[in-house]
Amino acid sequence: MYDILVIGAGAVGCAVARELSKYKLSVCVVEKESDVCEGTSKANSAIVHAGFDAKPGTLKAELNVRGSKMIKELSSKLDFAYKQNGAMVLCFDEADVGKLEELKQRAVINGVDGVSVISGEEARKLEPSLSDNVKAALWAQTSAIVCPFEMTLAFAENAFANGAEFRLSTKVTGISKNGDTFNVKTDKGNIQCKIVVNAAGVFADEVHSMISSQPMKIVPRRGEYMLMDKAAGGLISRTIFQLPTKMGKGILVTPTVHGNLLAGPTAEDLDDKQDVSTTKHGLDEVKAKGSLSVKNIPFNKVITGFSGLRAVGDTGDFIIEQSDIKGFIDVAGIESPGLSSAPAIGEYVCKIISGIIELVQKDNFIDTRKGLVHFFDLSNDQQNELISKDPSYGRIVCRCEYVTEGEILDAINRPLGATTLDGVKRRTRAGMGRCQAGFCLPTTMALIASKLGISLADVKKTGAFDTDRRQDDE
């Protein structure tokens, strides 16, 4: 019997679990995939939005502004990549400058500092590669970029360190309630708990309907991206948006915290909640619309295309509330700015739970976490010192991203460790470079097979691993 069961181990589910782990509670996170960060959280723009876009008075506005400030602090405490690079929203028609002023006013109401409207000439002084057609821009200095994999993993590992249990490769198939106890059926057996937090992303409506009679509809909105090599990363230094529409913030062009250049996403509502394919027309749209904002984008340096699904609710706002079933809390429709809002959503959910059961803070909560060592970021002296202690850090496996054997072994061995190629990639970046694992794949597979005691034939790109990797095996 757990006090709280969190369904879904994306950025929001893991942020909720971390916040709950501050209290004297038994917390379990269930995730149908074989790793955390397998859904929307692994395929997004990686932007920490300043908070000027969300409609004042909404949860999106409140939690975006709060979450953005929290992420900046947490990046230091939990050791994940973060850079406050600022953002611009571009206007290509003098008649639309008023819309920028409206966004600026939203920023003022929402409590966002450092937002101003500047001329096209001023914008190009800051970013010389901007289109000559830019007439004006909203300049938001507090916007930032983050590594969404590292951030989600940091939340998960910190929650784990504070006693939260994670059951991966465990799909919820039904929910019932008897008195004050929920019985959550999964493909790995039943789980009893007092409170359920539904953070299942695009599947949140399906989980909701397992127990509640209230209607909920989540539409998966596909966004396609193009990621360019680090050789293109210096084209711009700020995140470049276009004026938003009802379908979202449009095609953006942004540097990443690791030095690449990213363009996207498109916005296409689908019926299939698992369709993360890329399409010719989608990638053509990314090229065409991205080129409206920034001149001479080197699309010949694209190293991969990918897509993600945003969970779009039918209310126009985040759905974070206790349902008609006492103790069942929906955290649904978390589209943009969901990543930016994640830690604040964790706080908000705890406030809801505090109205159901008493929350008592721990005296021994661990509020810091040490991430993986990234060999490439170390000085020569630090690299030599690390190699003298552990020679595996002297063997380069991924030449594109300069990832060592020691980093891959750490990714596999650490709490909630990687069991797949994608799991290693998200933790270390091995395979994310220009050759897209063409060189490092065999060695990475061999390291996974050796550490997990399986054959090379059993190593997977993604998906469930046969051996139970729950915390009681650690």
Image (cartoon, grey):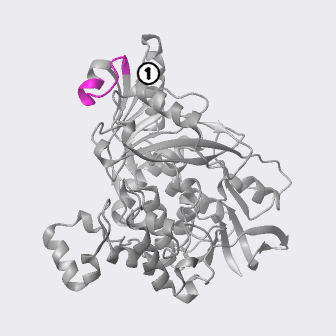
Specify the segment rendered in magenta.
123-136
Q: Name the one closer to the observer, 20 or 95.
A: 95
Q: Position of residue 465 (x, y in %)?
A: 60, 77
Left or right of residue 322, residue 126 in this image: left
Going by the image, does 268 lie left or right of 394? Answer: right
Whether residue 128 appears in magenta in the rendering, the answer is yes
Instruction: Report the side of 436 relative to 355 (left or right).
Output: left
Viewer-proximal residue among 372 and 361: 372
Q: Residue at x 39, y 60 (%)?
A: 74
Q: At x 46% / y 56%, what residue is drawn? A: 148
Query: In which quadrant will I find the N terminus?
Result: bottom right
Q: Position of residue 435 (x, y in %)?
A: 38, 56
Q: Does the rendering let one see residue 21? A: yes
> Residue 252 at what x, y percent from top left?
45, 35
Q: Position of residue 113 (x, y in %)?
A: 36, 37
Residue drawn at (72%, 46%) of the image: 218
- Magenta-span inclusion, residue 285: no
Task: Determine crowd level at label 1: few under 14, some 14-19, many 20+ residues with C-alpha closer than 10 A.
Answer: some
Residue type for callout 1: Glu
Residue at horizontal 29 percent and vertical 28 percent from the top: 129
Q: Is residue 362 visible?
A: no
Residue on which the image places disc 1:
101
